[in-house]
Amino acid sequence: MKLNPMLFAAMLALVTTPGTAQEAAARQRAPATPGIVGALPPKLIVVISVDQFSADLFAQYRTHWRGGFARLLTGVVFPSGYQSHAATETCPGHSTILTGMRPEHTGIIANNWTDLATARADKTVYCAEDESVPGSTSLNYTVSDKHLLVPTLGERMKAANPATRVVSVAGKDRAAVMMGGHRVDELWWWDGKKFASYAGRATPPVVTQINTAITAALAEPRDALGLPDFCRNPDRAVSIGDGKSVGTGRFARKAGDTRAFRASPEIDDATLALAAGLIRDMKLGQGVAPDIISIGASATDYVGHSYGTAGSEMCLQMNALDEILGRFFGVLDTMGVDYEVALTADHGGHDLPERNAEHAITGAQRIAADFTTKAVSDAVAARLKLKAPVLFGDSGSGDVWVDPGLGARQRAAVLAEALKTYRANPQVAAAFSRAEILGAPPPSGPPETWPLIARARASYYPQRSGDIIVALNPRITPIADPTKGYVATHGSFWDYDRRVPIVFWRKGIVGFEQPLSVETIDIAPTLAATIGLTLSAPMVDGRCLDLDAGPGNSCQ
């Protein structure tokens, strides 16, 4: 199976403009740049987050890869990396990757949270917005980095040497912002129609070129992709009700369908094309200081939400992303840049319960339609003879806030009754109060051994987090009706959402695989060590991972 070549042809054009082919040939004739064995720091750090790329997907498909993933597998592989916190969503997960800190310190507790003190009518706050902008809502917002409380690795690199360039590109604004941080030279995200950035920023020619190519691509329909042999077995329809099914679409789409575009390999192809173009045009990795680019490949997440993680769509996505990454690395090779790659994910995911049930997975079911924050709030208010609402939140699990306008005795009564109600629900594994979470000891030891309350604490920031944190039972999908939108999701306390791969690669590296658990907060200090950057205050939660057992041990 081959992808439509349109976007990759645009990417190739970025490195074959007049003069560039000759420059690339000259670099190829030059002596090879020493790799990590030579203990010289890399000139360019490339950090790739594959959204919703669970350790389970990594294990399932690794034997089929022949492209970019196959190259990375020759590096240093940690198949059991952990987004160790409970809030296994996109924004919190991305906030850990290049800060080296858990959400309890980054302040990014969820994709959205409730702030009843905010001045606007919409009390939901999106993690990457500035809610103070007049007229904004959590759905119609101005993208901002204001809620990220700590610096990223790129910011620290720039503070140490202002010549460092920091670039972030992603299929989602929250991925670009949380990995790029507050001091970026270029930051671009897919806004649903084009790649966009903060207001007032100049648009580089390569962004215009990619956006033009995307517009042309969207004007044409796309046929279903062909199936590799290893994708034929899951190519069968799974009913989700109301005459609808998933499992056999193969990314066919109508002209102009931007939603289908983003839930397909096409958006990753475009994102990597833009990243390659910015590297080329900005000459990243060719300056006096090391540069860093973070790349958020978002399609896997949209595919998982729209079709599940175990169908032919995900199989095609894994195969396509392998090809896309292979071509991207090939383009970087022609530039002659000494680059180091770190690849991981913001969280994992699990399949839709209808297919899980077919696979005899115990406990696979959807959340009850009447299990919502509003329903619990109404029940609690009725029992206490109070006016509803007394509880706030945007789902049946996760963070729940008690009305701050209640008196102290009423708040205590609502809290106690709500905890009793949640804990009695057969779909709930645990419910913790603010006091219980803050009174628990800090997380320690291997993340797979942490009790649920430690996982909750790792993503608990008191100024934003709820008065109650609710954990659903394993395999409970918090989407009651799959026919009205997404069919599957993530965000649980459980390891299918917490475990992700972490892989490092650089030319000359001596590859090995370490099966014991590590954390995504270990990525930033590990990369800092490879460029000789000492991390000062604020101190990170992670630790340096040893990538080289030889004399160039990066953690010494």
Image: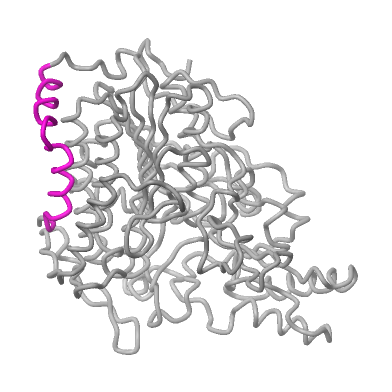
In the rendered structure, the answer to whether residue 493 lies left or right of residue 352 reads right
Q: Residue at x 21, y 33 (%)?
A: 332
> Going by the picture, which residue comes out furthest to the bottom?
242
Residue 387 visible in the picture: yes
Q: Residue at x 18, y 41 (%)?
A: 14
Q: Residue at x 34, y 14 (%)?
A: 40
Measured as percent of width and height from the top left, residue 266 is found at 23, 58
Measured as percent of width and height from the top left, residue 489 is found at 43, 66
Q: Residue at x 24, y 21 (%)?
A: 508
**Placement of 30 over or under 513, stated as above or below:** above
Measured as percent of width and height from the top left, residue 12 is found at 14, 43
Residue 429 visible in the picture: no
**Placement of 482 over or under 19, stated as above or below:** below
Measured as percent of width and height from the top left, residue 118 is found at 70, 64
> Going by the picture, which residue comes out furthest to the top?
551
For residue 9: magenta?
Answer: yes
**Placement of 351 over or under 506, stated as above or below:** below
Q: How many marks?
A: 0
Q: Nearer the viewer, residue 10 or 430?
A: 10
Classified by dominant secondary structure, the portion drawn in magenta counts as helix
**Placement of 139 over or under 173, stated as above or below:** below
In the rendered structure, the answer to whether residue 229 lies left or right of residue 248 reads left
Q: Nearer the viewer, residue 158 or 232?
A: 158
Q: Which residues are magenta?
A: 3-29
For residue 62: magenta?
Answer: no
